[in-house]
Amino acid sequence: MSVLLLLSAGRGPQECAWALSQLLRRLIDEGARRGLTIEQVQSVPGDRSGTYRSVLIRISGVDADAFAASWTGTLCWQAPSPYRPSTGRKNWYVTAQPPQRDAQPTTFRESDVDIVACRTGGPGGQHRNKASTAVRATHRPSGIVVVVDEERQLSLNRGIALRLLRQRVERGDEAAQRAVTTARWRIHDGLVRGDPVRVERPAPRRPGG
C-alpha cells in the first residue's frame, strides 16, 4: 500500500521552510523504524539551501495510511530560529495534507464517437444541403461536439471531425491537469497555525557531544 502526503510551509517566514526540512527528516526516520519506504515525488525549494516550501512524498508499506494519518494536519517544529537569533519565536508551523489526485487522462477511441450525417447551410447552394455531406460528431465520455462541413465528401468530413475531437479532448486533459496542480499547491494558503497535531523538537544534545 502507498499513500501521498503533501507538506507545506505555507506563506510563513524562512524558518517555516527550515522547519519543514526538519520535520521531513523526522518523518522519514520514524517511517524507517516502522519499516516504511518514503520517497520524495515533488518539491519546491526554500530560499535557503536544504529547506523546502513544499514537498510531496509517497509513503509505502504496511499501515502506510495510518502512519500518514498520524502526520496529517498542522505540525509544529519547536526550536529557536537559526537565522534570527534575536527573535523570541520558537514555534514554526507546517501543514501536511493528502494532495488532490492527478487528473486521469482520457483515452480517445473512435468507438466512443457518435457520427451522424447532417445538412448545413452556407456556400454550396441547394445541392450541398440535400447531399447531407456534413457530419455531427459527439465524443460521449467528454460530451464534446463538433460539426464539420468543409468538404463535399462525407468520409473527408468524418476524418476532420475525428481529428478535431481528438485535439479538443487532449487540450481538455491538459487544462484539467493544470487545474489539479493549481489546487494542489493552494494548500499553501490553508495553513492553520496553532493547535498542532504534532509538536517536534530537536533531539537533546548528549553530554560532551
Image (cartoon, rainbow, N blue to C red):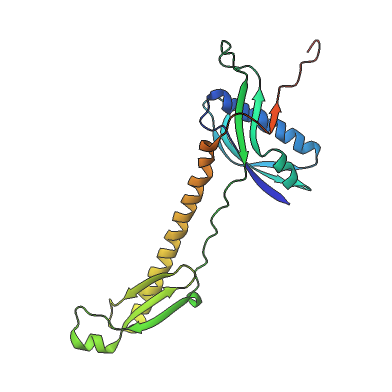
Q: Is residue 127 left or right of residue 22?
A: left
Q: Quadrant of residue 70?
A: top right
Q: Is residue 50 visible from the viewing direction of this image?
A: no
List x then y, in percent, for residue 31. Answer: 75, 38
Instruction: From this view, report whether residue 120 is shown above or below residue 32.
Output: below
Work out whether residue 196 can be spotted.
yes
Q: Give the image quarter of residue 39.
A: top right
Query: Which picture quadrant has residue 114?
Result: bottom left
Q: In the picture provided, is 45 more to the left or to the right than 120?
A: right
Q: Residue at x 23, y 85 (%)?
A: 128
Q: Position of residue 96 (x, y in %)?
A: 62, 38
x 39%, y 82%: residue: 116
In the drawing, does residue 7 fall left or right of residue 138?
A: right
Relative image position of residue 12 (x, y in whole percent): 53, 27
Residue pictured at 49% horizontal, 75% vertical? 112
Which sits in the foreground, 196 or 75?
A: 196
Q: Quadrant of the C terminus?
A: top right
Q: Quick check: 179 left or right of 38?
A: left
Front residue of 8 and 107: 8
Which residue of the protein is positioned furthest toward the front in this rendering? Answer: 195
Task: State how many labels appear.
Answer: 0
Image position, residue 27 (x, y; %): 71, 34
Q: Residue at x 33, y 75 (%)?
A: 147
